Image: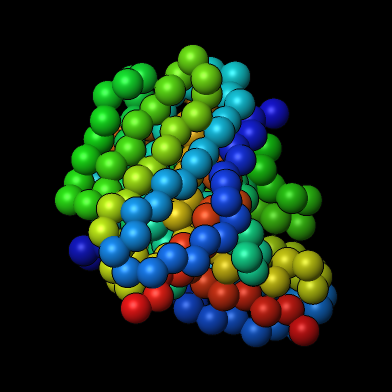
Amino acid sequence: EDKVVQSPLSLVVHEGDTVTLNCSYEVTNFRSLLWYKQEKKAPTFLFMLTSSGIEKKSGRLSSILDKKELFSILNITATQTGDSAVYLCAVDDTNAGKSTFGDGTTLTVKP
Amino acid sequence: GAGVSQSPSNKVTEKGKDVELRCDPISGHTALYWYRQSLGQGLEFLIYFQGNSAPDKSGLPSDRFSAERTGGSVSTLTIQRTQQEDSAVYLCASSLRRGYREQYFGPGTRLTVT
């Protein structure tokens, strides 16, 4: 059974700090790994990673995948209060057609 | 429409009643997904459709849950004889096709079974 584990479960930082969120996975036939940000209800897409070692970057957010060690990290630099959210990691299985999500990391950024 | 829409946004029902949740995906998206999210938990996959067919129903928690999709567009998730443990937010997502970049999520339906 496919499995995704995120750590830490929750994190509290102050504005300006840099944070690293972790995602490890076990999947039979890996297709891709995705990061989402969930502020209230609907998760919104951040990154899709398919190849090892290639950093994806969007503003203060960046992410990288290690397919050998089966994990990904999401970095947020110079955090702002608007970064407060649940960050979800998901992996897609080539054959199963579904995404398996982790339980998320709840990030709280204090002013 | 511009995004994925779901209705109702909130539903309170008594234990034992049947409920229907509706999802309107983004026009042209062939893949549609249903997830369930309990408080403080991640997303639990329920079912996905490619067109009108559902190749993978393995995530449906019990035979009280069923889903259909007609015309390659609107989908309905039906829960029969609801139980209190069915209380959760039910999220629908669509994508251009299975495995194509990201899934676009709807705002969800919050179901409360009393």
Task: Give the vertical position of B93 relative to A65 (above or below).
Answer: below
Tell which of A68 and B103 is nearer to you: A68
Q: Quadrant of residue B82?
A: bottom right
Left or right of A30 in this view: A79: left
Residue at 62% across / 65% down in the picture?
A: B40
Tell which of A92 and B26 is nearer to you: A92
Left or right of B99 in this view: A94: right
Location of the C terminus of chain A (image quadrant): bottom left
Residue at 29% across / 64% down in the picture?
A: A16
Left or right of B63 in this view: B12: left
Task: Give the vertical position of B10 relative to A39 (above or below).
Answer: below
Q: Is residue A41 visible?
A: no
Location of the N terminus of chain A (image quadrant): top right
Q: How many marks?
A: 0
Q: Quadrant of residue B47?
A: top right
Tell which of B12 and A23 is nearer to you: A23
Left or right of B79 in this view: A45: left
| Residue extending furthest toward the left | A59
Q: Give coordinates of residue A9: x percent, y percent.
A: 60, 55
Residue at 66% across / 43% down in the picture?
A: B59
Q: Give coordinates of residue A99: x percent, y percent.
A: 51, 38
Q: Give coordinates of residue B65: x percent, y percent.
A: 70, 55
Q: Quadrant of residue A64?
A: top left
| Residue extending furthest toward the top | A68
Residue at 64% across / 69% down in the picture?
A: B39
The chosen color scheme is rainbow
Tell which of A95 and A29 is nearer to you: A29
Q: Give coordinates of residue A97: x percent, y percent.
A: 50, 31
Task: Give the vertical position of A36 relative to A48 (above or below).
Answer: below
